[in-house]
Structure formats: structure tokens, C-alpha cells
Image: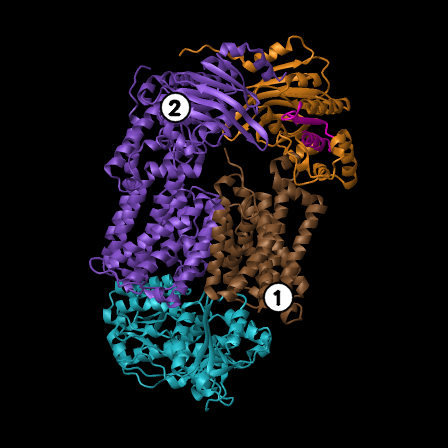
Amino acid sequence: MSITRRKVLAGSAVGAASLASGLAAPAIAANEPIKIGYLPALTGPSSSTGIGINRGTVLAVDEINAGGGIDGRKIELIVRDTQSDPTKAVNAVAELAQRQKVAIVWGPLNSGEALAATPLIARDKVPMLHPCWVDELIDVKKYPMAFRIAPTNTQVGGGANYYVVDVLKLKKVAVISDTTGYGTASVNTYVPMLKAKGAEVVYENHVDAANPDLKPELLRMQSAGAQAIMPWSVNAGFLSRILNTRGAMGWDVPVVGQTTLGSGQTKALLEKPENWNKVYSNNFRQVCFADGKLPERAQEFVERLKKAKIEMGDTLLWWIALGWDGAKMMGDTLKAAGPKADDIVAHWNKTKGWPGVYGTVTWTPEQHNGFPDSEVVMCEVNSLKDGAFNLAPGYAA
Amino acid sequence: MPISAPEPLLEISGLASGYGKIGVLRGIDLRVGVGEAVALLGPNGAGKTTLLRAVSGLLPRTGAIRFAGKDMAGASPRDTVQAGLVHVVEGHRVFTQLSVFDNLLLAGYGMTRDERATQVEEALAFFPDIAAKRQDRAGTLSGGQQQMLAVAQGLVRRPRLLMLDEPSAGLSPVLVDRVLAAVARLREGGTAVLLVEQLIEKALAVADRVYALARGSIVLEARTDEADLPNRLEHAYFGQDVNAPLSS
Amino acid sequence: MTDTSAPAQPVRALSLARIEGALPWIALGLVGLLLPLLDDSYIGVIAQRAFIYWILSAGLNLVVGYAGQIAIGWVSMLTLGAYTTAALTAGTATPAWHPYLALVAGGAVGALFGVIVGLPALRLRTFYFAMTTLGFATIVTQVALAWKEVTGGGVGTPGPVFPWPFDPGWGFYYFCFILAALATWMTANLASSRFGRALVAIRDAEVAAEASGVAKPRLLVAVFLFAGALGGVAGGLFASLQSYITPDAFTFEMSVLFFIAILIGGRGSILGPALGTIVLTVLPEFAAPLVQWSTFLYAALLLLIVLIIPGGIADLLDYKNRRPLERHREIVPRPELLARVLDRRTGGEVLSLANVELSFGGVRAIAGLDLEIRPGEVHGLIGPNGSGKTTTLNVISGYYAPEAGQVRLGDAVLPPRAPHLRADYRIARTFQTPRLIGGASVLDNVMIGGTIDGQGSFAESLLTLPRHRRDEKRLREAAMLALAVVGLDQLAAVRADRLQHSELRFMEIARALMLRPACLMLDEPAAGLSADEIRRLGALIVAISRQGTAVLLVEHHADLIFDICDRVTVLNLGKVLAAGTPAEIRSHREVVSAYLGA
Amino acid sequence: MFASIVSYGLAVGAVYALIGITYNVMFSASRVFSFTAGMLGMLGGVLGALFIAKMGLPAIVGLVLVLACGAVIGLVTELLTVRPVLKSIEQHLYVLSTLAFALMVQQLTAVEWGTEAQPFPRLIPIGPGWLDQQFWLPMLACAVTIVGLELLYRKTLIGRAFLAIAEDSYAARALGLPETQLRMASFALAGVIGTLAGFTGAEMLLAFFGNQSILNFYGFVPVALGGMGSNRGAVVGGLALGLFQQAANFLVGGIFAAVAVFAVFIIVLLLRPEGLAGASTARRV
């Protein structure tokens, strides 16, 4: 990894030394690296997303710096591992914004920390770019400098609901989540959306993810006549239990839901591979196989990853792509608008159809959610290959 | 010491012990000869139990302890038991959840299986009362039977010296006699006994020699056949020799 | 020795020590006050976090460090306070409250649940209690998850934003600072009051605390109430600092952090845990690469502390108690000062037992005992082992309820099974094994004895209101006097566990004298004393009785009994074998033979 | 549906019961309640998955290695966290020392093994349904442990020595029983039982560092309800807890099951601090 505290210290030592040698101030500024605050959860619970995203982010920053940086100035990532702990995120925001005076904050990558960090970053008037899905995190009035480079929960759930109701044509749906913030929020948002689409929600519950036995829950769904299960959780153990229980019951019902359904961890916890059949998880059109081929941008990106010897088998392509997009977006912006906060925000507000690997981003002054609905799709989880999936049956290629 | 004293088995000199900060014993000198029965008497709180605990290693102590020619200064209870110095603690503390037989087997912990079997039988032979109840849980025994069991536990190792702490406590007079009779038989069999007792007369009847302990020190040592012993004991107990007038 | 004035010098030394003890606080306060001059809001956030954690820890310190209750799951108070304040401010359950009012409500909810969580401590063993606090912490989190309408469920809810003057930024910083200072001040007041001493006594010498009239339930409830309130207030501030709270913010690790901070700081200290809290809040910021190891390191630190320096930081800082004491110390009691300790209004009543019976599991420990202990007399109680002396003492002390018969003081029947009420009757006692608070000064140990003479309430002590200050002054003077009486005044400031055994025996007598006892029971006071010390002890006991106190002396040292007793009762098999003057008893053949076991 | 409650309830209950026995075995020898009981359960699963799934060892070798590790960790627990504080047992420092040690091991596991739950290999390929090993393996382990302990206590001298130490350690010491060695043996035995619980329950609970706190609490509930030191109480309490929890899961569902268990635990303890089957202890003056 290219970002350590030692480097930060070394950087400031160089700064101090050059100041002492009496060089002209503008020259220093021109050589000083541009600091980007970065708040991934690299350790602790639910760190696998962070690790995946981190690979893309680090690769992009390294490439930008290898290519001469931003007008000769290097990008320096100041990384603070939040460990999925909001209190660490709050401390880190204060440090990044006030002490390090970073130009942009990239992250936090998890909603739990982002909920606490966003108002503070807004208070400190630092441009913020993040990939968290919780809708409330973007609000142009409360947080005018915060931008999202990923879909919202509404979009994600909408994609899944669309697939169940409009593609699979199923009307009776069971919605289940774990008790985390993400899980409960998802259910609360999606159930009304499903109902609005004319589906009947025959079961709805939050279950402790540590609960070893989900059979009672599935039996209830079954007896309620559910035709599809929609689980909302990022907990692989929880999801695999649903799939295993479904398999053990011999219940041939499609499972449609969150991306973690297709993660390697979930796969590892399956009792038998068949339990992964008829499971469709959220994914993103730009990084899915259609007829055995990735879209052009993604294909090119995969080649790049292979060249840089970045491991893909143990993570997901869209995580790496998202990490890459985030860093790339910041690099492009700094190049175009410079490191001043207002310039960055102004630039972002004008972004239209920015071609990311993960998604095509468009922001306006009124809309800081940049991800297009059309790119939120479902995929077949048992088609996992090199971290990417086939589009679910029923989508036009 | 009388000249006819037998060869020493247990020799203690300058022993001090206590509980944490509370020093109970000071400068104790005491000896028990091979095959000798010695009574250790003294009023409540004089430190008799403390002395036995210190000797068997249940309490930390300073001073010299030699047993059968071996230095026992740093010995643990396990060491002293293995050396043949067995301490039957106060209050017939047998293991109530285990059978009589198991209680005795435990006393032979660390011996070979055959040795243990024979010696348990030997110990049981001493106490026909409990031999009949060998499969009963020790908790179902009466107090006297429990005391006999405790003494029998002490015998399993064929000790050279058996220290008994108030074996008569809480027993009816008949049972006291039974227990003390067993002590007498032991002595006849050549086992030395150090007996702590409240019942002075009964203790004196069993013992060859007597020590009296008061306020943590030995205040009297005598043969049990010496004249005027009861009077001297009384003095030792009530401590008139250390009396000092008070001005209040 | 005709000088009857109590030596004042140790008192002066004590007040000097108090000024010295305040220095670290003044330094910490100055740092806190001036920190905003750095204008580094990162430091500000870390400091706010330290203040907030300390507000909770200050209260928890009374529970853990002082009362010795192992409440591992105290993070639940933070959770409750945070959600109460946040939900009331946001108006999810009720019309929206003003943030400051909501903060007060957070404190109130914390106080309420502090008591609910604390109550099991009155009945449960340590480990069980630790488990219940953990269980409660889990329940709170589960409820926060489930009660979506109010708490926002797993999504969480925004924290309160306090308006001017304590608005976010340095305003809020000063708010946290002031409240932390207030919490420190109040806990320090309490810790140095009779309530604080009683808490430590419950931890280290529960029996002695009871005998001194400490009502454990009431005291613990008050402490849990206060600690819960501080936890709740800290929670409200925490919610504001975090700007947004979700149930996952309140982790078990956080609970352990508070707990470890206190233990690293040292039990029975306030400065130590405060430093511990600061260190544990700040440390992770300097050790970013070690972040994932932080819990491991805290736990390792805890293990080291427990195994190597159980006294914690406070012990390391306590250089004064490492100064060597004079080696050959003599205890010279000054009975002539007694008249100033014991006031005569309380004496003059006879303690009597009438036909008391008690048996344990079929064994009759006391079988129809009559006993009369008269004021102004020393009454000796002797007998062989198992004759019922200790049982008699325990019946009088209220540990056992007699199956028949009564214990009276004058005309009043003493309530059975209520040891903590004996002090109200001015019945004091000492113990076979001295019961002391090893970590507290000799003076503090003695002041425990005067607990029931305090007038001020718990709240008055928290705020050092005048009544509390009068109490303290009076108790301190009385304790110094009592120490002068037993000859230990020079050692008043020394930690009690540094004393010799014989000194502890006299210290216990001083503690008992604090009650100005109508009846004083001494349980083997001469055990472990030298002949010289026994003689001085005898003279002291006689002098106490001559002030009009009824003294009951259980003792094995027959010479002491016969020398100083006015009357002796001999017990055997739970009955009176003989009673009379020492001379009569001495020549009583049955007594001699019972003693000699004939 | 009923079958699901019973099979899962008994299986989970058997794991709780075994953890309860782990508490008891340590308690009997030392009068110490150790926070390491849940840790042992957690390690049983993690080490089993490590040896068998990651390192590819045969299942039986893996099991033996896991139990051996358990015994060693038990010994370390005794040496490091119990013996040094045993002298001042009334200060309850053991609560802190064992908690600290358990937290260290848990954090080490989280860092080295990862914080994601990982699968535990299926050892015996029969099932699904009732014959599934995840149901009968914990029950079998529980039965084997109970029978084994009973045989140990009734038929061997060392077993009787355990009982003797548990009843009256002073008298046992006076009798020349090697108290320290017996205590170490007890902790090693507890290590074996605790890791066995984790190993057999791991297909259900997964190899997950977070199982430690769950097992610590749910393993303690049967001890608290059944009376400390009583293995029979722990088994009855454990199975009852498992069934209750599953039934609550089914009947009221989700979050409230956990709340119900905690509520019952606290209420029972407040009404009968010595447990439903235990006897009260004497006072200390």
C-alpha cells in the first residue's frame, strides 16, 4: 500500500526543510502532494468490501502518480482504517479535515460510518465522494458537497423489485433482513415499493444474523405462499443459511436480493453447490457478462488488473471497479478543477455521463446521486467467474 | 529431656507461623520420638491447630523441621505425607459425596494399586463400625463414624507419625473412648502419635509425654507420669506465671 | 503524658496532602481550558471524546473502583442516554424537546436504569452480576434495533445538536469540559465523604461496614443512580459528538474500554482512572497501524495490571506510601483522652440476653443463654472451642436470629438479622481477624466507624454543601482523637495495609470508639499481641469501660481475662457453666475441669 | 416445524450444556468462573476448520489436534490467569484476568482468522434432515462427555480426587492430594470439553470469532439456572435453553427471542440466586 503515516510525516518533513532553505512558497505548493482523505474499513467486521474497493483505489492512485500526478503534484491518500466503527470514523474525519486539510474525502465505504461522518464532513466544508447506498446520505441542502458514485438503496431495491415483479412475474414475496442498520433500512424502504408495484408482501421480518436456525422463518414464508424470497443483508453467514435451509426443504423458490448473495464467502458456506441455483443478486450492467462477454470498458479494466497482478478471484470485480472509479473520478476532477473545494464541487455539479468502469456518472446541482437506474441489474450468482457474473435471465443484452 | 528418650522422629526448633500478618506461633521447640505418643494441650487460641498445620506444610512457616532425619523446612503437605508424617485435620472433614471406600482410596493417592488395596483393608480393619459401611456415602455416617473414617484415612499410608487434631471434638463420650482406644492401639503397633486434645485426662491417659501451648509458645513439657502434672497444667492454662498487676 | 490535646500535626499534614493531591487536577484543568487555543479541531474532537468517556467512567469508577462491583456492561447507560437524548430532540416519540432538556432526560433515564441494572448486585455473586450487566447491554442494543419508530432501528437516528452557547465546535467542547469537570468534582467529593468511605468498606471489609451501620442496599442504590445518570448524560453528549447514532456504535469493546480504563487507573482512585481514560482514548490515535490490535493491547494491558500492579496507575503515583515507616514503633494509648471521645449521654444501659437459643442443623450452639453486660464493667466471656462464644457475639451483632429469647439494650429489643442496625443502638465491635480497608489511610478506616453520625445526605456530599463539610470536619476530628486515644495518631495518614498486626487491633478499637459505644464487644483483641501490648490493651479496655461503656470481652488469654474483667461468664456447650468475679471463676472447680477437659 | 424446533434446539442446547460443563469443571477445581469457556468453544470451531478445511488433515486427526490445543490452552489459562490470583480469590481478580485473556485470544483470532464466519467442513456425509451431523454430533458429544465424566468420577482415582478437591480443597491438601496438578488437569480437561463443544457445534454455528461472546453467555445461563458445579443441572439447563430459544425464535421470532432469554435469566437469578437446583451458601462471619 502506498499510504502510511510515515510518508505523511516524511512529506511534512520535506515541507519543513524546504521552508527552512528559503525557497519561494509557490514552488513548494506546486510540488506538495495533494492529500485525499480515505476512510475504508480494512479490518474488523464486514471489511471484505473495503478490501476489494481498496485494491482498485490504490491501483488508480498509483497509476495517476506514475503518470506524473496532477500537474506534477502527486496524490497522497491519507488512509484511516475505520474498522466499521463509527467512533473511529468521527475521529478520523476531524483529523483529515482539520489537521491534514485534505482536498477531498473518499469514503467512508460503509453506511454505518458514513451516517456519522457525513454531517461532520459537511460542517468542515470538504468535498466528499462516497459509494454508500443509504439514501439519506445525499441531500443537496444539508450536505451540498457530498456526492455519490454508486446507486442508492432505492435504486438497488428497485432493481430487485423490478426483476421479481416485472421480469419473473411473481406477485407473492417474502422480505427478510438481518437486524443491522443496512438490513432494517432496506426492508423498510423496499416493502412499500413492492406494494406500490402491485406485489403482495406475504412475509416481512428482521432476524438476528447470529441465529443459527432460519428454518422457522422459511417455513413461515412457505406457508404464507411466498413465490420469491428477497433477503437484505451483507452477512454471508445469514444469507448462506437462508440458501441452505431452502435447499434442505427442497423448496424451489427464487432468491432475489443483495450483492452479498453472490460473494465468495456465501459460496464457501453453502452446504452443496446446488443451493446457489436460482439465486439472483444485484449487480451492475457495466461489469456483468452478457452472452459470455464483458462490456468493453470492463474488459479493458480486467486486462489492466491482470497486468498489475491484482488478485480478483477472492473478491468481486465491481468492488475493484468501484474503488478504481472513485480514485479516477477524483484524479480527473483535480486535473480539471484544481484542489479548491468550491471548484471541485462546481466541477462535480456539471459532471455528465462520466464513463466509469463501474457505472456512468451524472451529477447536477440538484441531484448528487450519480448512478443511472438502467445500470442496476440482477445477475446469476452461480455464474461467478473471475469476480464477475452473468446477467440474470430475462434482461436484454 | 529424660535420658531414656527414644530416638527422635520429629524435631522442631525455632518454629514460627501464623496467618498473613497475624503471627500465632513463636519459637516453638518440640520433638516426638519413634513410636512415642505425645499430647499437645493448651487453651483455646493457643495455636495448637496452627502448629499442626505448620508442621504438615498447610501453613507457611519459618524455623527448622526435621522428620526421620530429613529436612522438611520447605515441604508441601504432599511431601510430608509421602515422608510418613500424616495430619488428620480437625472437624472430621471427610468427603461426604464419596463412599467410605473411595475416601480411603484417596488417602492412598499416588501409591500402587495393590499397595493401596491392602492398606485400605488394613485401615478398615481398625474400625469395624465403618468397615461394614464401606459402600455408603461418607455423608451418611454419624459424626463419630466420620471421625473414625478420618483417622482411618490417616492410617492408609502406614504413617510413622500421625498427627491428630481434636479427634474427640463433637463426639459422645462412648465414641471418644473408641477413637482414643484406636490411638492407643496404633501406638502399640509402633506408630508415633502427636495428639491435640481438649479432654486433658483422656489425652494424658494415652500419651507418654505432654506439651502445653499457651499464647503461641510452649509453656510446659513433661512426662505424663510426673507428679503434680494437673496443677502445672492449670497454671500453664490460666497463665498466672505471666501475670502482671495492672494499674488502672 | 498529661497533655490532653490531640496532636494537630497530622491534620495539617493531611490538608497539605490535599493541596498536593489537587495539583494534577489543576494541571489537567488548565490543559483542558487552554486546549482550544491550539485551534485544532481534531485535537478538539479527541478531547471531547475523552471528556465524554470520562463523564461515564467517573460514575462507573464509583461502582467498579470504589464499590468493587464488576459491571462490565455499563456501555448500556451510554446507549440509553444517547438514544433518549437523540429521540427526544428529534421528536420521534413525543413532541420535540429542547436539546438541553433532552440531555437532562437522558441523565434521568440513565439514573433509572442504573438502579435497575445495579439491583442484582445486592443479591448476586460477582461473576453472576458481571454476566447480568452484559446481558442487559445486549438487551438494550436489541431493543434499539427493534423499536424502529423511536430509535430508527438499525438505520439509527441523528444525534442532538446543542444550540448556543454550546453549539458544535468549541462551544460543545467547553460543554463537555465543564460537565467532565463537574463529574470529577462531584465524584471526588463523594469519594472523600463518608459515603465514599462506606463504598470502599463494602468492597474490602463488608462485615465491618455493616457493623458500623452502613446500609449497603441504600448506599448502592444511590451510587448506581448517580453513576447511571452520569452514563446517561455522557450518552447524550456522545450522540451529539457522533452526529448520528446506530446500535453498532455501542460495542462490547467500548464497554471493556471504560472498564479497563478504570482498572488501569487503579481502584479507589479518581485521578488514576481519569488518566486511564485519557490514555485509552488518545492512544489509538497515535497507533493507527495498530488499530486492529487495539482490543488485544487493551486486554494485554489489563492482564498485566491485574497480575503485576493490581493498584494501577494510582499506586505508581502514590509515592508517599512508599516512604519507609519507622521500624520500631510503639503503641502508646492515651486513655486520659477518652472522656473527650465518649460522651456519657449514651452509656448507662445494660445489654442483656434472656434465654437465647440457637441451633445449626440439629446441633444446639446456644441452649438457653442468659447474659447481662453492665455499663462501666468489663465482662469476660470464655469457654472451650465450640462452647458458643462466637455464636453469642454473632447473635448480639445481629447476624443470627435467635430461635428463642431476646437480646435487649436497656428496654429496647434488638431486631434480629439486622447487623447494620446495631450501630444505631451504639453497639460496636471488633473482629477476630481485623477487617480493614487496606488501600485507605488509617484515618479513613477509623472514620468509617462514625458513618451513622453524618447528618448530610448523599446529594449534599456530591455538592460539598455546608452540612457535608461540617460532618467531615467533625468526623475527622473525632477520628484523630480516637486514634490519639489508642496511640496511633502519628500513623493517621499511612495506608492501613502497611500497619503491623498489633496496630490493626488498636485501629479497630479506635474505629469502634467512633460510635461512642454504649456497648463494645471485643473479639479476641489480644491475639497476636506481645505481652507489653496486651498490658496496654488491658489498661485501655478498662479505661473505656470506666467511661460508662459496657464491654464484652471474648478472649483466650486467661490472664488478661482474670486481670481486667469485673465479671466473667464461662460457656460450655452453649450454656452458662459459671458466672462471677474473676476470683470466683478462678477457683470454680467445674470451670477448671471444663477447661482442662476432665 | 416441531421437528425443526426439537432438532435444532437440542443440538444448540447440547453445545450450551457442554460450555456449561466447561465452566463447571474449571469452577470445581478452583472456585473460579472463567471467561475462557466461550473462548474454548469458539476455538473448537475455528481450529477445526483450520486443521481440516484449510490444512486438509483427516477429520479424526483434526479433532485430536483441536482437543490437544484445547488442553494446552486450558493449561495456559490456569498458569497465566488463575494461579497468580488464586491467593486473593475474594477480590475476584480472576474475573478480570480471565476476561483479559479471553479477549486477547478472541482478538488474535479475529486478526489471524478473519472476522467473517467461515464454513466448517462436513465430516460425515449423511443427511439431510434428522441424520444431519450438525444435529446429532453435538448431542453425541454431550452424551459422551457426560458418560465420560461420570466414569471418570466414579471409576478412577483421579476422578475422585477431582470431586474431593471440589468439595473440600483444604482436607484434600492435608491428605496429600496434589492440588496444583489436579487443578491443572481440570483446566486441561475443561479445555478439551470446551473445544469439543465448539468443534461439534461448528457446522451449525460456523467457525466464527464472534461465537465467543455468544457461547460465553448462553453457556453460562445453564450454570446459573442449574446451580454452579452441577453438570446434570448444566445439561438439563442447556437443553432447556436450546429448546426455549428455538421455540421463541419460532413463536415470537427475531429479536425478541434474545430478549426473552435474557429476561428469564435475570428474573430467575434475582428470585433464586443460587440457581433453580442449587443450595444457598453459608454466611461469611
The answer to whether residue A371 is left or right of residue D109 is left
Residue C411's tag is 2
Chain designation of label 2: C
Q: Nearer the viewer, residue C325 or C11?
A: C11
Q: Secondary structure at mark 1?
A: helix
Amino acid bearing label 2: Asp
| x and y, in percent, of residue A306 in the image | 49, 80
Residue at which label 1 appears: D134
Amino acid bearing label 1: Gln
Quadrant (top left, top right, bottom left, bottom right) of the N terminus of chain C: top left
Q: Secondary structure at mark 2?
A: loop
Q: Are marks 2 and 1 on the same chain?
A: no
Distance of label 2 from label 1 (alpha carbons): 72 Å
The answer to whether residue A176 is left or right of residue A335 is right
Q: Which residues are magenta?
A: B144-172
Other-residue count near label 2 (Cα within 10 Å), few / some / many at <14 / 14–19 / ≥20: few
Q: Is residue B121 visible?
A: yes
- Chain in orange (letter): B
- Chain in cyan (letter): A
Chain D tint as drawn = brown
Residue A261's tag is none
Q: Is residue C496 above or below residue C221?
A: above
Any magenta on residue C453? no
| x and y, in percent, of residue D25 in the image | 60, 48
